[in-house]
Amino acid sequence: MINGHMFQLAIGVLLLLFGRKLFWLFVGVVGFLSGVQIASQLFSADSRIEVLAIALALGVLGAILTIFVQHLVVILAGFLAGGHLVISVLTLYDWNGEHYVWWFALLGGILGGILALMLLDWALIIFSSLIGASLVSQALSLDQAWTVLFSIVLAGAGILIQSRLLERRVAVA
């Protein structure tokens, strides 16, 4: 049976390698991660089932909506990915300005949404690589310094691999 860390690792690798091509998966993962963060704030620690249900609902909703309204959902995913990445970085460094975390997440989300709007393919490549690297690094349970270094290397590799795939697509078209 696959445990949570193996599933997280597999999804992270898929996002690193094929996040732009599997944008519905990227949007679903970002919806799920955002759902976990939001629901964790709304429900007590005893409400793990509610948190998981909300996270799954947001993930599935995001993946389904991507099929019908791709550009709008990608902008929303850029917003959510930007906010999630800001919260992940602040959490990694044990930043304890609770009152300002959501303001920084909102700013990261706005910048992520703008990036997604301006550079659709590249936004998908960059955000899916960053989220994929974050998922893989967290699944491996490394210490903080190694997590940061490994995340940077993985994100760079994901961006490089996906950009090569994008160049091939453009060259063929």
Image: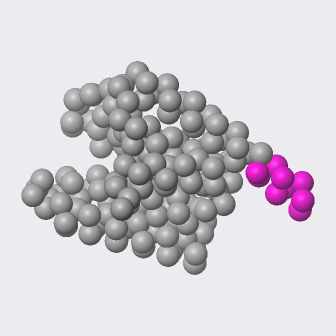
The reply to whether the magenta stretch includes residue 171 is yes
Q: Looking at the image, is 31 positioned above or below residue 119?
A: below
Q: Which residues are magenta?
A: 165-173
Q: Position of residue 173 (x, y in %)?
A: 89, 62
As drawn, which residue projects farthest toward the bottom? 68
Q: Nearer the viewer, residue 6 or 44?
A: 6
Q: In the image, is 27 to the left or to the right of 140?
A: right
The quadrant of the image that shows the N terminus is bottom left
Residue 86 is a magenta residue: no
Q: Position of residue 143 (x, y in %)?
A: 35, 26
Tell me how many marks there are: 0
Q: Residue furthest right?
A: 172
Can see residue 76? no
Q: Nearer the viewer, residue 93 or 143?
A: 143
Residue 49 in sight from this viewpoint: yes
Q: Is residue 161 left or right of residue 138?
A: right
Q: Residue at the location (77% across, 45% down)?
A: 164
Q: How is the image coloured?
A: one colour
Task: Give 114 or 135, whichever is nearer the viewer.
Answer: 135
Left or right of 116 in this view: 35: left
Q: Furthest residue to the front?
A: 1
**Where's residue 65, x and y in %?**
50, 74
